[in-house]
Image (spheres, grey):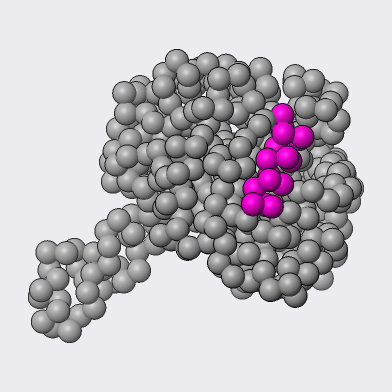
Amino acid sequence: MPVAFESSLVVQSSATVSEPKSAVTPGASRGKASGEASDAPAAAASGVNPPLSPAALAIPRSGIRDVFDRVEQVPDAISLTVGEPSATAAPHIVEAACEAARAGHTRYTNVLGIPEYRRAVAEYSARVKGISYDPECEIQAVDGATIGLYLALAAVVAPGDEVIIPSPYFTSYDAEVMLVGGRPVTVALRPENGMRINAADIEAAITPRTRAVIINSPGNPTGAVTSAAEMARIAEVCTRRGIWAIADEVYHPFVFADDDMRDTDDVRNAAGKSAVAPSIAAVPGMKERTIVVESLSKTYAMTGWRIGYLLAPENVIEQTGKIAELMHSSVNSLSQYAGVAALTGPQDHVAAMREEYRAKRQIVLDGLSDCPVLRLVRPQGAFYAFVDVRLTGLDSDEFSRRLLDEERVAVVPGEAFGGAGRGFVRLSYAGDADDLREGVARLRAFAERVWNPITGRHSASYHPVAVMA
């Protein structure tokens, strides 16, 4: 059984307690003024700043942001940290936003989104994922997947409820559960299982306080894709145990159906065309207990547009819409019109990005092939590789710090993604191909040098002179 959550502690199933990610504690050097409410009158009398919220102080800061801060101090570094397409939105998407602005569509919209956008989402979801939603009451426009996840959690999680999070996980999952008063309970993803989500592991972590499980496939940071067959088993657990599935599907179109991929036939869309990740909402009986969190950021290279959507039962959308109106009134109107063009227009650029990522993934696979010290679970989707660095003898944080200092290459330490990420680093292969090739070569050379400073081998593509320059 999982260990009980206390304060900001994130717990791990199988009786393994994970360490919480580091929380930012502004003003901690000022002692009690930073958060002890009992001294507030004395603080006011002495002119010391009033205390901050203990709840806010307990929320962990994203470990990715810590890396970004370090990279800013190394301007010539090759950064393999950013989970963002190198492309920008296609011209027809940009033009749709410009045309909407010229037409004066710059006012508040319905909090659920303009009707055209919700209809476009409904049509896309049916065409690509094989799931049907009513645009009038089961779809909501949101300001990207992160706010969508918060709204989903706020609608179904009560204070003290537990939310199961397969670990390693995207950095905001545990913090957002905590923001709504819930208790994150982590379940370790296993390399021997390809880092895929496992129904039996989820069920073993369920307690009477479990309210939901977060499903992320393709996964960030691992690139793992959970098969339709396993999704069906997870759905059976959710149905039998009466818990919600919150499905983060923002990388759904970026799946690489390799010959060695388990359940390859399960990653085809409803029309049998390009590979997409299976959605748990498509399992019979699961639509009523699933909240799908989606974004146009990755699919259409629209990260800065901040536009996404929720798919959920009507009673959930009623609550998420109410909460969203109190938070922001409505979603950016121009982004919604651009979203209509993205979802209903040509999809060639999406297919092109998928093939680009497939080629860049091969750069990573080739660059780390036969490396005696680094091990890699072959990523099946998204644009991330999760590299096992434990044989170097360095922990993830020291590995990433020294790699940046000595080789001018930035990766994200696995601890940023929860306790199960210890001993791994994440690299993104969404950026420039030449930078990726050089960065992977330096990564390998560094690992081999640390592993054996005398006889450590260097890959053929590694050029010490270029590195020193």
Q: Residue at x 78, y 29 (%)?
A: 269
- Asked whether 87 falls inside the magenta stretch, the response is no
- Asked whether 118 falls inside the magenta stretch, the response is yes
Q: Is residue 153 above or below residue 197?
A: below
Q: Residue at x 42, y 51 (%)?
A: 322
Q: Residue at x 36, y 34 (%)?
A: 162
Which quadrant of the rendered structure holds the N terminus? top left
Seen from the viewer's position, the closer of residues 81 and 394 is 81
* Res 253 quadrant in image: top right
Seen from the viewer's position, the closer of residues 468 and 351 is 351
Magenta span of residues: 115-130
Kindly report the secondary structure that dominates the magenta region of the rendered protein: helix
Q: Position of residue 188 (x, y in %)?
A: 51, 30
Q: Residue at x 16, y 64 (%)?
A: 37
Q: Report if residue 446 is visible in the image.
A: no
Q: Is residue 426 above or below residue 289?
A: below
* Res 258 quadrant in image: top right
* Res 11 quadrant in image: top left
